[in-house]
Image (cartoon, rainbow, N blue to C red):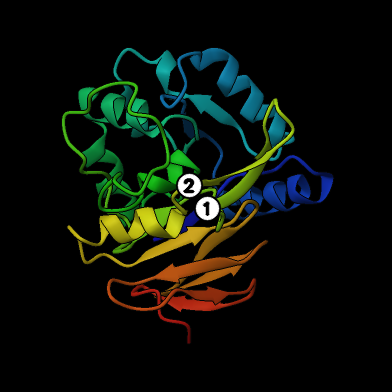
């Protein structure tokens, strides 16, 4: 099984270069890659934008253009699920009957998979560590289950911030940190979670995963948060080797 899972954040030249290299390597043996744009409402423009981001390295073909997207997957060599709103993406994956076919082809090693942001989130057993607004209902929280852990994309450790009021006074806002929200997830689930900073990627290396591009945090139920740096090799249980 060949996987590339990214948090997103390719706004700089360096990060864009890293993104293009990793995408090219992930789909190096693919002629046609199915792009799944359902995390956005504008499927055509989103697909074209991601084709531009890929820099011509990969031939991305929007799966939305096919009347039968499930059958269309059979003619593709790889699968790339883009980012956007995870709730919208999960609804569409379920309604279009794509959860099972994507899962089976990737786990069988037939097609490499790449997912960024929402596309990385749905590679997990459940979508419940997304940051996105619940803008629509989903048939189920169940997602692809390509990895036995959860991803929290766009991880940020903040919580306390200050702002200046109209009267010129500094007021505090003790907002919930991302770690706090993940601890709430762990009240109901035992899955370990990796919080991926912007510009970070997990690339499968056999039975292990390599962290590339930026650091990440590992959060386990009942345990202290652990920070890992780029280059770290992690097991499927998110244990550093």
Q: Which mark is residue 175?
A: 2
Of residues 63 and 49, the one nearer the viewer is 49
Distance from disc 1 to disc 2, alpha carbons, whole Å, reads: 5 Å
Q: Position of residue 114 (x, y in %)?
A: 49, 47
**Residue ID at (36%, 51%):** 110
Q: How many marks?
A: 2
Quarter assignment of residue 44: top right
Label 2: element kind: loop
CB-based contact (under 8 Å), mark 1 and mark 2: yes
Q: Quadrant of the N terminus?
A: bottom left
Q: What crowding class fits label 1: few (fewer than 14 Cα within 10 Å), some (14-19), or many (20 or more)?
A: few
Quarter assignment of residue 39: top left
Q: Which residue is mark 1?
A: 159
Q: Is residue 78 visible?
A: no
Q: Position of residue 34 (x, y in %)?
A: 46, 32
Q: Position of residue 218 (x, y in %)?
A: 44, 70
25 relative position to 176: left or right:
right
Q: What crowding class fits label 2: few (fewer than 14 Cα within 10 Å), some (14-19), or many (20 or more)?
A: few
Q: Position of residue 13 (x, y in %)?
A: 83, 44
Label located before the other in sequence (1 or 2): 1
64 relative position to 23: left or right:
left
């Amino acid at each position: 099984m060949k996987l590339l899972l990214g948090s997103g954040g390719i706004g700089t030249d360096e990060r864009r270069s890293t993104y293009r290299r990793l995408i090219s390597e992930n789909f190096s043996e693919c002629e046609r890659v199915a792009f799944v744009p359902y995390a956005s409402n504008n499927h055509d423009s989103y697909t074209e934008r991601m084709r531009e981001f890929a820099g011509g390295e990969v031939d991305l073909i929007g799966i939305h253009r096919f009347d039968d997207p499930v059958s269309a997957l059979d003619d593709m060599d790889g699968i790339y699920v883009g980012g956007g709103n995870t709730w919208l993406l999960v609804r569409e994956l379920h309604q279009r009957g794509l959860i099972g076919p994507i899962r089976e082809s990737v786990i069988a090693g037939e097609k490499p998979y790449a997912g960024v942001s929402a596309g990385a989130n749905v590679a997990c057993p459940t979508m419940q560590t997304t940051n996105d607004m619940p803008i629509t209902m989903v048939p189920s929280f169940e997602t692809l289950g390509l990895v036995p852990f959860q991803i929290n994309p766009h991880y940020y450790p903040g919580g306390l911030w200050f702002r200046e009021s109209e009267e010129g006074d500094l007021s505090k806002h003790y907002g919930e940190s991302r770690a706090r929200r993940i601890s709430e997830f762990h009240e109901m689930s035992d899955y370990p979670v990796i919080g991926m900073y912007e510009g970070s990627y997990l690339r499968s290396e056999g039975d292990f995963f390599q962290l590339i591009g930026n650091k990440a945090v590992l959060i386990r139920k009942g345990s202290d948060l652990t920070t890992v740096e780029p280059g770290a090799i992690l097991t499927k249980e998110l244990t550093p080797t």
